[in-house]
Amino acid sequence: MGMPAGQRRMRADARRNYERLLAEAEIAFTEQGTEVSLEYVARRAGVAIGTLYGHFPTRQALLEALMRGRVETLGTRARELLHHPSPEEALYTWARAAVAHTSVYQGLATSLMSSFEAEDSALHAACQAVVSAGELLLTRAQQAGVIRADASAADLFTLISAIAWTSEQVPAEQAERLLSFALDGLRQTQATLPTSGFSRSPGRVIGPASDG
């Protein structure tokens, strides 16, 4: 896993603790989800909880460090897919990869969605990097006329996060079908459903606004 420039100058023992914490957090989050006790992660790594917080002040900071390589992979994959002969297939291939990367831990999609607009979250930059990667392929597909012009990169990120969250609740086969349905909705068609006329009320499911 990559390490930021500031971490490269750590003492050898601090660097070992950093790497051990990341390795044990990867196992713990994979097995128990992102809400696993950080004290448990520290114990697995054989360090005090203060040592963990010294490296990762918040749970989001630990998640960001774990996600860094995955985010870089998504960026690299997006740039590779810019050369795919089908802009639509390139976008859909990347979206499926993004769902896989953002559902690797139970609860990760929820953390990403809540950090998308929270600039003070350590995960905010990771969210923006995923948005930027997806935007490359989305823009190309829109310019080719195969994807709705009113779809934004933020819409794509939200769709991916929602399907990643859903994949935690339903069988894999159903999650794949739901992703296909959602991606089909991005296709440019002669008749486009209106996006206005919907309202959001606290505690209510989004639905058509009442005429009354």
Image: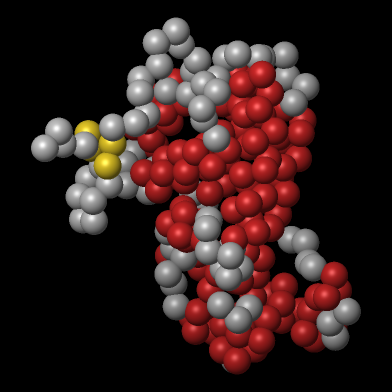
Q: Which residue is the extreme one toward the right?
A: 9
Q: Which residue is the extreme one toward the left?
A: 212
**Which residue does the image show at 65% across and 59% down from the upper left?**
125
**Which residue does the image show at 49% across and 84% down from the upper left?**
39
**Which residue does the image show at 72% across and 27% down from the upper left?**
81
From this viewpoint, is residue 31 visible? no
Locate residue 94: give its quadrant: top right
Q: Nearer the viewer, residue 177 or 196?
A: 196
Residue 83 appears left or right of 45: right
**Quadrant placement of the C terminus:** top left
Q: Nearer the viewer, residue 37 or 118?
A: 118
Residue 56 appears left or right of 30: right
Locate residue 33: give its quadrant: bottom left
Q: Position of residue 114 (x, y in %)?
A: 46, 60
All told, the count of numbered labels is: 0
Residue 84 appears left or right of 194: right
Render colour scheme: secondary structure
**Which residue does the image show at 44% across and 8% down from the upper left?**
190
**Quadrant placement of the N terminus:** bottom right
Q: Position of residue 181 (x, y in %)?
A: 39, 24
From this viewpoint, is residue 51 visible? yes
Q: Nearer the viewer, residue 153 or 80?
A: 153
Identify whether 175 is placed above or below 26. above
Q: Which residue is the extreme one toward the top?
A: 190
Residue 146 appears left or right of 187: right
Identify whether 37 is placed above or below 156. below
Q: Position of residue 42 (x, y in %)?
A: 56, 83
